[in-house]
């Protein structure tokens, strides 16, 4: 189910915020800190638009589920398989961020923002 494009009025600010958060997540691969700034911004955003709310929900879930994966990865480094979880986290996060960014740039929402999948 594809949601209609939303890019007018206050939707422009929400669209810009969603895109900025995705970019902060991408920069977070190098810095880590910018991803934290992104999730804080996503938590702070409140909108009546279901299109943009779907992005903010998706971004929040991406951050927190990713953090859990990184914690599990750190623990599993003890038995030398943490790198597998870390590699999965990197791929999973990258796919979700790029997918969300492309949809946001097109003004479309996330079909199922509560999903844990790609």
Image (tube, rainbow, N blue to C red):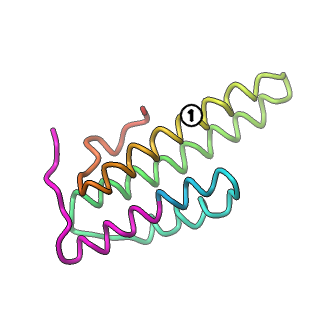
Q: Quadrant of the N terminus?
A: top left
Looking at the image, is 118 positioned above or below residue 6?
A: above
Q: Is residue 37 left or right of residue 102?
A: right
Which of the two residues, 101 or 89, is positioned nearer the viewer here?
101
| Count of picture labels | 1
Of 77 and 103, nearer the camera is 103
Whether residue 16 is situated above or below residue 67 in the rendered picture: below
Residue 73, percent across and down? 72, 34
Residue 25 location, quadrant: bottom right
Q: Could you say where residue 93 lies in the image, as x and y percent from the top left?
A: 53, 41
- The residue shown at (23%, 70%) is 11
Outermost residue toward the right in this view? 78
Taking the spot 62% from the left edge, 63% from the top edge, the residue there is 34
Q: Please give the name of the residue rendered at 21% of the width and 64% of the height, measured from the top-left corner.
A: 49
What segment is highlighted magenta in the picture?
A: 1-21
Tell me the quarter of the image containing the C terminus: top left
In the rendered image, residue 14 lying in the magenta stretch gets the answer yes
Reply yes or no: does residue 46 show up in magenta.
no
Placement of 3 over or under 87, stated as above or below? below
Q: Position of residue 17 (x, y in %)?
A: 39, 69
Residue 115 in the figure: left or right of residue 7: right
Name the residue located 36 percent from the left edge and 69 percent from the top edge.
16
- Give neighbour class at mark 1: few <14, some 14-19, many 20+ (Cα, 10 Å): few
Classify mark 1: helix, strand or loop: helix
Residue picked out by circle 1: 91
- Give coordinates of residue 4: x percent, y percent: 13, 53
């Amino acid at each position: 189910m594809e949601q209609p494009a939303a890019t007018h009025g206050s939707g422009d600010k929400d669209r810009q915020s969603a895109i900025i958060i995705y970019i902060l997540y991408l920069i977070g691969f190098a810095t880590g800190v910018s991803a934290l700034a992104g999730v804080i911004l996503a938590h702070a955003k409140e909108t009546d638009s279901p299109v943009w709310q779907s992005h903010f929900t998706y971004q929040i879930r991406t951050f927190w589920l990713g953090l859990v994966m990184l914690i599990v990865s750190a623990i599993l480094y003890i038995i030398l398989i943490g790198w597998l979880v870390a590699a999965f986290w990197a791929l999973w996060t990258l796919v979700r961020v790029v997918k969300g960014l492309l949809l946001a740039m097109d003004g479309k929402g996330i079909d199922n923002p509560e999903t844990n999948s790609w």
